[in-house]
Amino acid sequence: CNAQGEDSFDVNIRAKNVSAGLFGDSTTLDYIELGFILAKGDILAYQPVSVYGGLGISEPVEYAGFSMERFNFTAALGLEEVYIGAGGGGSFSDMAMDMSAFFGRTCDDTRVSEIDPQSAHLLPFGTDVPSPFTGLYLRGEVSAPIPVLDFGCALQIGFRGSAGSWITLEPLAQVGGILGGAALGSVACVGSVRGQVNTVGAIDINGKPYFAGEAFVIAGAGADCDRWTWTDVGRSRKDRWCGTGDFKTGVSYENGDWSYVPGLPSVLH
């Protein structure tokens, strides 16, 4: 990336907390941006060689019984970057879903994690500074009302499944996937609990395998605990009308070595 070197520069226009009308209601965009990369040209002193943009929403948007919990979109077209990505999550009645997809090449791998924050824990991103990413990434989660036990709000238990896959060319050629499941429940009409296990497997171009597994348990109590949105510990801590506590642990295998992350309980959020 940055093949033009000092002969190019980035013009970025980014606004935060922008009010907009969606589905007839007013909501606030976390950000909306439009950018250009300009380089010295033969006809003009500087001419555009790339254009990019995106937006993000984390404020719930209600429409006809459907609640959109988050939405992110990004795209670029240029000499060094060509990509499109979108991700979002929402719920309808007792059904919830979260879908994310990214395809193409970007010089900044945070473009992928903006679409799906979970990708930062799955893909071979750089650890210090943003690095190029080229590939295809897909991940989805669906929670359907398939009760194992249903005694009204006094006691409910159901399940949720998640799956995803990716193929990358840079920063590391790799093929991988994720598979996970969760059990969700409510107790005494005010308490909620969720337990989830995720497993990740990948193999790179050199034949080196990678495996990781994580498990977490979240418990909460309050007037409105949205346990189907607790796809990770971070999201559960943002549940406005529910006090939560959590426990998370994990194991991984990389470069021939196993490592274990001991968990510690965390309350009250």
Image (cartoon, rainbow, N blue to C red):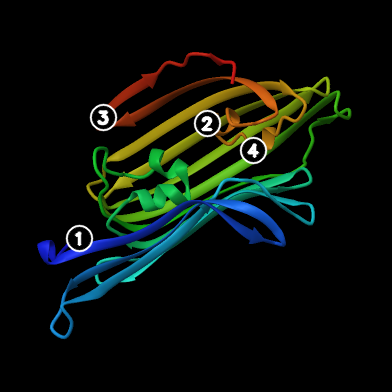
- The residue shown at (48%, 28%) is 214
Amino acid on which the number 4 mark rests in the picture = Thr
Label 4, secondary structure: give it: helix
Say left or right for 58 vs 6: right
Q: Label 2, on which residue?
A: 234
- Closer mark to the observer between disc 4 and disc 3: 4
Mark toward the start of the polypeptide (1 vs 2): 1
Q: Label 1, on which residue?
A: 1
The reply to whether discs 2 and 4 touch (Cβ–Cβ < 8 Å) is no
Label 2, secondary structure: give it: helix
Amino acid on which the number 3 mark rests in the picture = Gly
Q: Nearer the viewer, residue 10 or 121?
A: 10
The reply to whether discs 1 and 2 touch (Cβ–Cβ < 8 Å) is no
Amino acid on which the number 2 mark rests in the picture = Gly
Q: Quadrant of residue 232?
A: top right
Say left or right for 145 vs 216: right
Q: Quadrant of the N terminus?
A: bottom left
Mark toward the start of the polypeptide (3 vs 2): 2
Mark toward the start of the polypeptide (1 vs 3): 1
Q: Label 4, on which residue?
A: 229
Q: CA distance from mark 1 to mark 3?
A: 32 Å
Say left or right for 237 vs 130: right
Label 1, secondary structure: give it: loop
The reply to whether discs 4 and 3 touch (Cβ–Cβ < 8 Å) is no
- The residue shown at (23%, 70%) is 38
Amino acid on which the number 1 mark rests in the picture = Cys
Q: CA distance from mark 1 to mark 2?
A: 33 Å
Q: Label 3, on which residue?
A: 256
Q: CA distance from mark 4 to mark 3?
A: 35 Å
Image location (x, y in percent) of residue 216 = 55, 25
Crowdedness of circle 1 by 10 Å Cα count: few (<14), some, many (20+)?
few
